[in-house]
Image (cartoon, helix red, strand yellow):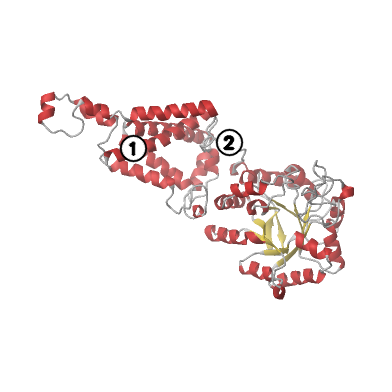
């Protein structure tokens, strides 16, 4: 038993020691981002710690040197009881920064957890070590030997607890060569590969923390709903990538945006002021799960298509309503296809079916001809959702080669034709249409799927009439995009269209 406890103590000690050393040698490590983005019920306390530069500096020092000293003490067995207690307290602070009370139910890199996660288990083991009267190996066990020198005769004749011989004393130094092996391995790894990419302490992503928000994100109305002018797009979390000829991009997005990461991203969006998301129909289940786990009030806009059953082609609308979707629109490709094929009665029926449930009904499209022809046939939705971006970027194919209704996913090998690269093929005609309609307009693909910088794309869309913009964002982009949106709306100078909504 004593060997087992000793091994566990040394293993946990090494974890502490290594994490502390990595933070120390990284040079610019700080707990600011970790604390600012906490979402537990004690988040106010963690945010308070970062509000003062002095407090934050103290927190960073306690983290780094606390991990190092606790780890060293546990590894070599000196002051092990107090080290285990301090370690358990430190882990408790880590645990309640991101408590596993529902969020970690979702499959992620750490597995499926609820209440009990790896931090919880490690803290529990340290509490056990604190109360357990260990008679294993460590420098602590040398104390009795150093305090009293028992003669060989007395040692043979009188049973003693603890250390009774030099041989036994030497056994208690077993953790030192083990620690040396670990340390040498870590040093060699650092020499060969540089920064340790597996430690969270050294991952450096250019992510702006919530504390850096530059104000409150403005809102507008869509029906009775108050929506942030910046709406979260659903493609990145749904795994759909418009990535030109990068065939691995969709798999990469799905690998990054695990369910846990999606939950974290959506919570971050809400904290940053983004209170609405526009999703594809297959993402409904994910959003229902998010609402149940977090109690979120985020508005959900869902794109629907035509159902497979001939007897009920509007079945998708019914299912969306049953799942509590707030706003429903006909998906862009479906609108383009139905207009192209002259099926205006189906589009009209879709709008009427959505409205029959008392829900705001939208119409999406990529080709502006879809809206123009719908309008000519008397179909006016509660709002339009239109691709809105300029074409001044390298991969946009020549204007003279663009065709109406070509943005349907069918790409051409000829670079001078559509190849998943231009989603608003006629920007001038789009501007003209948007500036004369009297219902709200939500612009999407405003960055041309990553070809245009947000500062450029946001400004172009808002100045040319968009009332809302829908933008797909990874978690590390959220706060930065919100700030860009706030600054853009504060400094609009060339918008001619009045705000609708």
Quadrant where the C terminus is found in the figure:
bottom right
Relative to 189, residue 111 above or below: below
Residue at left offset 81%, top offset 66%: 380
- Kindly indicate whether the residue at mark 2 contacts the one at mark 1 (C-beta within 8 angstroms): no
Residue 170 left/right relative to 39? left
Estimate the x, y position of residue 472 in percent, counting from the top left: 68, 50
Quarter residue 342 falls in:
bottom right
Residue at left offset 59%, top offset 42%: 211
Closer to the camera in the image, 385 or 497: 385
Closer to the camera in the image, 373 or 32: 373
Number of labels in the image equals 2
Q: Of all residues shown, which one is farthest toward the front?
A: 413
Relative to 337, residue 12 above or below: above
Say few, some or many: other residues with alpha carbon within 10 Å of mark 2 (under 14 / 14 to 19 / 20 or more): few
For label 1, the SS is helix
Residue indicated by mark 1: 7
Res 51 visible:
no
Estimate the x, y position of residue 245 in percent, counting from the top left: 73, 45
Q: Nearer the N terminus, badge 1 or badge 2? A: 1
Residue 294 left/right relative to 455? left
Could you say which disc has been placed on residue 383 in the image?
none
Estimate the x, y position of residue 221 in percent, counting from the top left: 71, 60
Residue indicated by mark 2: 204
Instruction: Give the label, 1 or 2, closer to the camera.
Output: 1
Relative to 437, residue 479 above or below: above
Quarter residue 82 falls in:
top left
Closer to the camera in the image, 430 or 413: 413
Estimate the x, y position of residue 358 in percent, counting from the top left: 69, 71
Cα gap from disc 1 to disc 2, whole angstroms: 33 Å
């Amino acid at each position: 038993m004593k060997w087992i406890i000793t091994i566990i103590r040394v293993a946990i000690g090494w974890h502490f020691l290594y994490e502390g050393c990595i933070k120390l040698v990284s040079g610019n490590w700080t707990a600011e981002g970790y604390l600012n983005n906490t979402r537990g019920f004690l988040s106010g306390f963690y945010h308070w710690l970062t509000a003062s530069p002095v407090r934050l500096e103290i927190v960073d020092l306690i983290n780094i040197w606390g991990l190092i000293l606790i780890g060293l003490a546990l590894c070599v067995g000196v002051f092990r009881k107090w080290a285990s207690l301090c370690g358990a307290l430190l882990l408790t602070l880590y645990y309640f920064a991101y408590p596993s009370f529902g969020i970690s139910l979702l499959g992620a890199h750490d597995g499926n957890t609820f209440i009990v996660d790896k931090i919880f288990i490690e803290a529990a083991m340290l509490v056990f070590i604190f109360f357990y009267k260990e008679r294993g190996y460590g420098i602590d066990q040398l104390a009795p030997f150093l305090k009293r020198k028992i003669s060989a005769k007395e040692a043979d004749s009188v049973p003693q607890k603890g250390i009774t011989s030099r041989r036994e004393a030497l056994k208690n130094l077993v953790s030192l060569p083990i620690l040396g092996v670990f340390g040498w391995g870590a040093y060699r790894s650092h020499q060969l590969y540089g920064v340790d990419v597996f430690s969270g302490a050294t991952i450096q992503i250019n992510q702006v923390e919530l504390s850096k928000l530059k104000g409150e994100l403005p809102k507008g109305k869509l029906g009775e709903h108050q929506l942030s002018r910046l709406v979260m797009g659903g493609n990145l979390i749904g795994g759909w990538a418009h990535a030109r000829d990068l065939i691995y991009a969709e798999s990469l997005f799905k690998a990054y945006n695990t369910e846990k990461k999606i939950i974290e991203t959506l919570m971050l969006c809400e904290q940053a002021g983004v209170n609405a998301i526009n999703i594809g129909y297959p993402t409904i289940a994910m959003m229902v799960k998010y609402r149940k786990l977090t109690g979120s009030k985020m508005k959900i806009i869902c794109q629907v298509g035509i159902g497979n059953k001939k007897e009920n082609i509007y079945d998708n609308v019914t299912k969306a309503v049953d799942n509590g979707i707030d706003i429903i629109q006909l998906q862009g490709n479906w609108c383009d296809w139905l207009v192209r094929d002259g099926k205006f009665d189906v589009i009209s029926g879709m709008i009427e079916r959505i409205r029959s449930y008392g829900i705001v009904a939208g119409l999406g499209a990529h080709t502006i001809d879809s809206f123009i022809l719908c309008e000519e046939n008397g179909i006016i939705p509660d709002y339009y959702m239109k691709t809105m971006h300029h074409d001044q970027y390298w991969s946009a194919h020549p204007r003279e080669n663009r065709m109406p209704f070509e943005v349907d996913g069918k790409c051409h090998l000829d670079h001078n034709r559509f190849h998943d690269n231009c989603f608003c093929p006629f920007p001038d005609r789009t501007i003209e249409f948007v500036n004369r309609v009297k219902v709200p307009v939500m612009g999407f693909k405003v960055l041309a799927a990553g070809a245009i910088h947000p500062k450029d794309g946001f400004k172009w869309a808002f100045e040319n009439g968009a009332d809302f913009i829908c933008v797909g964002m990874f978690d590390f982009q959220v706060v930065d995009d919100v700030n860009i949106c706030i600054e853009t709306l504060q400094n609009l100078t060339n918008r001619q269209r009045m705000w609708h909504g």
